[in-house]
Amino acid sequence: MNENLAALIPELALLGAAVIGLLAGSWLPRRRQWAVAVLAVAACVAGLVATAVTMATDREQTVFSHAFAVDTATGIGRLVVLVALLLIIGMSVQPVRGHKRETEYWVLLLMTGAGTLALTGANDLLMLFAAYLLAGIPAYALAGFAKDASGTEAALKYYLMGALLGTTMLAGTALVYAAGHATLYRELNATLVGAPYGLVAVGLIGVLAGLLFKTGAVPAHFWVPDVTDGAPTPVAAYVTTLPKIGGLIAGYRLLHQALPGSDVNWPLLLAILAAVTMTLGNLAAFFQTSVKRLLAYSTISQVGYLLMALAVATRTDLAQKSLLFYLAAYAVTNLGAFAVVTELPRARTLDDYRGLARRHPGLAGVLVVCLLGLVGTPPTGVFLGKLEIFSATIDGGYTWLAALAVANTVASLFYYLRWLAPLFFITAAVAPTTAQATAGRWAAGTAYAAAALSLALGIAGQAVLTLAEGPLLP
C-alpha cells in the first residue's frame, strides 16, 4: 500500500494552514489577524509549487490503497482550485479586514478548499463522500458568515439541500457497494458489469445526486440563486466556482473509471441533465435585475455546458481535456465578474451600473471581458473551452446536444448585454455616484488579474490543452 504523504502536499498545506491559523487567531489581536490571510496565501502558493513539480516530473500515482489518484485530472484540478482560492482571498481582503471573526473566515475557506481538492482526486466511493462533507460543511458556515437575515436564510437553504442530497448520496453509495461488493473504482469497473441493473441504476442516481448538488445542476439547483444572492459576495463567488470544479472532476472520474462497461445508460441521463440545466439557467437569467442572481443563473447554465463532457466521458478522448480546460477558463472568468461586484458593493441591480464606463473604465473593461467571455466570445478562454466541449460532444455521438448548446449560447447573449449596454450610457439616467462607490483596491486588482487570465487562456490555450491530455489512473 502506497502511503506517500508527499503526494498530498497541496491538500495537507491547506489543512495545516487551517489548523495553524485557527490556533494563531485565538491569541492574535483583531488588527493583526491579517496574518492568517497571509498564511492562507502561502499555503496556496506551496500547493501550486508542489503541483507544478509533480506534473513536471510525471510522478503520477495512486495512494492509500488507491483511494486517491494523483494524475492529470488531479493536477489540473489542483491548479485551478488553488488559483481560484487566491483570487477569492484577494476579493475577500477588504470586506473581511478587521472583522471580529476574520480568522474563522480564512480557516473555513482553507478547509472547504481542501475538501474541493480531495474531490478532484477521489478514486473510491468512501473517499468521495468524505470529500463531499469536507468541502460542504465549512461552506455552509461561510454562507451565513455575515449573520444577517439574508445570509442566515442562504446558509439554512444551503445546509438543508446539502444534508438531504448528501444522505441520498450515502444511500446511493451503499446500493452501489451492494451491487459491486466494492467501493474502489478499479474494482467496481469489473464487478458492476454483471451486477443487477436496477440496483446499479438507483445507486448511481443516488451518488450523482450529491455531485449534482455540488455543481448546482438541475434538479439540485434550487439553492444556487438564493445562496448567491444572500451570502457575502466573495462567498457567492466561491459557491458558484470551486464546488463545480471538484464536483465535475469527481463525477467524470467516477463515470470514466467505475462505469464504462455498465449496462446503465448513464450517458443519455447526463445528456438530458445537461440540456435541461443549460436551458433552465439561461431562461431564468433573461429578466433578472439583481446582478448576483443573474450571475447565479448564469452559473447554472455554464454547468449545463460542462455536463456535456461527462455525458461523453467514455465515448471520446476529447472529453477530459475539454472539461479541464473549460473549468479553468470558467473559474477565472466567473471570478472576474464577481470581483467587480465585490468592488462595487452598493451596485446591486443592473441599473446601478449605468454609466460605469465613464466613472470606472477599468472595471467596465473587466465586465466586458468577463461577461462576453461567459458567452464564449474570442479571444477569451471560455470560447476555446466551448469549442472543445462542443467538438467532444459531437465526436461522442450527441450532435443534438451540441446544437442545443449552440442555441443556448446565442440566447445567453441577451441577458449579458442587458448588463453590459448600460455601462456605456452617458445620459441623465446614469446611476448615482454613491451606487458606484468602490470598496478598495484589492477586489479591483483581483478583477484585473482574473480578466487577464481569461484572455491568456484564450490566447495560449493550446499549452493548457496539451497538459490536460494525460490518462486517468485506475
Image (tube, rainbow, N blue to C red):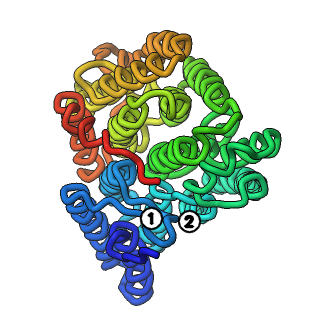
Rendered view: 58 above or below 23: above
The image quadrant that residue 40 belongs to is bottom left
Q: Secondary structure at mark 2?
A: helix
Q: Which labelled disc corresponds to residue 114?
A: 1
Q: Which labelled disc corresponds to residue 68?
A: none
Residue drawn at (39%, 73%) of the image: 12
Q: Secondary structure at mark 1?
A: helix
Bin the neighbour count of mark 2 within 10 Å (Cα to Cα): few under 14, some 14-19, many 20 and up: some
Query: Amino acid under label 2?
Result: Leu
> In the rendered image, is residue 387 in sight?
yes
Residue drawn at (35%, 43%) of the image: 339
Between the C-alphas of marks 1 and 2, the distance is: 8 Å
Bin the neighbour count of mark 1 within 10 Å (Cα to Cα): few under 14, some 14-19, many 20 and up: many
Q: Which labelled disc corresponds to residue 134?
A: 2
Rendered view: 114 above or below 460: below
Q: Position of residue 388 (x, y in %)?
A: 35, 24
